[in-house]
Amino acid sequence: MKVGVLGSGDVGRALAAGFLKHGHEAMLGTRTPGKNDVQEWARNHAGARTGTFDEAARFGDIVVLAVLGRIAENVIELAGVDNLAGKTLIDATNPLADEPPVNGVLRYTTGANESVGEQIQAQIPRTHVVKAFNSVGNALMVDPQFPQGTPTMFLCGNDEQAKERVAAIIREFGWEPYDCGSIVSARALEPLCILWCLPGFLRNEWRHAFKLLTNEG
């Protein structure tokens, strides 16, 4: 599988490295692919490619959006709406405000009845947006190990086939996928970032993940 990752920050690098680790091709897309830290990352990951947002969007059979939620619209414009048409896009963004947390609670740029996931889907209606990998820190996104068992990765999106494809990636990366329905459910999934970060800001605890438990069946 060829994967274009839009975003060269910690999340983008972690997911791109995860795809490479599991035998896929990956291109890290950024505004300035020639930057020293980006090129150093590529040298340290065998088979890694780097390019512009446009190049990464064209490269990927599947595309990952891993940037700050408040700049997602601009990054998609740079990537090219036509380059993303017909493809599955994993939306790992969260609508974080550019403000420090208050008593450990992050501030968001969206209201309770909207989400950046929905905004992205509206911006690229010919693309199958699937929200995932937004509810855990980058250090745990690929092959996490917990003594209590396999953690849950929540996802949502409008296209069933796209969600099945992303669910397969989630399993490959060591998680148990849980389908939360349409992209409207991003309104519930994005605030999980606030909850995940809370122990970190309050007690410097960052090694945790969510798990959905059920006694049915």
Image: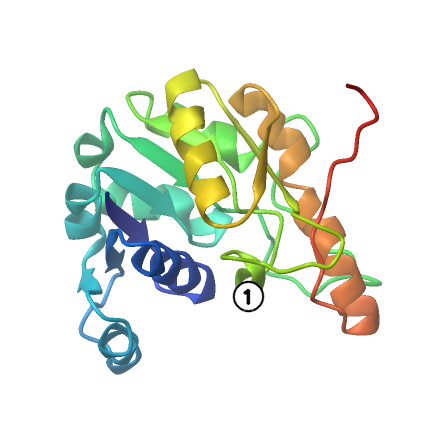
For image coordinates 25% across by 62% down, the residue present is 31
Q: Between residues 17 and 96, which one lies in front from this camera angle? A: 17
Q: Give percent across and percent down for residue 43.
A: 22, 78
Residue 183, image x and y in percent? 52, 24
Question: Is 137 placed above or below 165 here?
Answer: below
Query: What is the residue that sits farthest to the front in this orientation?
Result: 217
Across and down, in percent, residue 108 comes to 65, 47
Depicted 143 relative to depicted 72: above or below: below
Is residue 120 among what the camera can see? no
Give SS at disc 1: helix
Mark 1, residues whose alpha carbon is within 10 Å: few (<14), some, or many (≥20)?
Answer: some
In the picture provided, is 80 more to the left or to the right than 88?
Answer: left
Name the residue located 30 percent from the left edge and 59 percent from the top edge.
20
- At label 1, which amino acid type do we have? Ala
Which corner quadrant holds the N terminus?
Answer: top left
* Residue denoted by label 1: 139
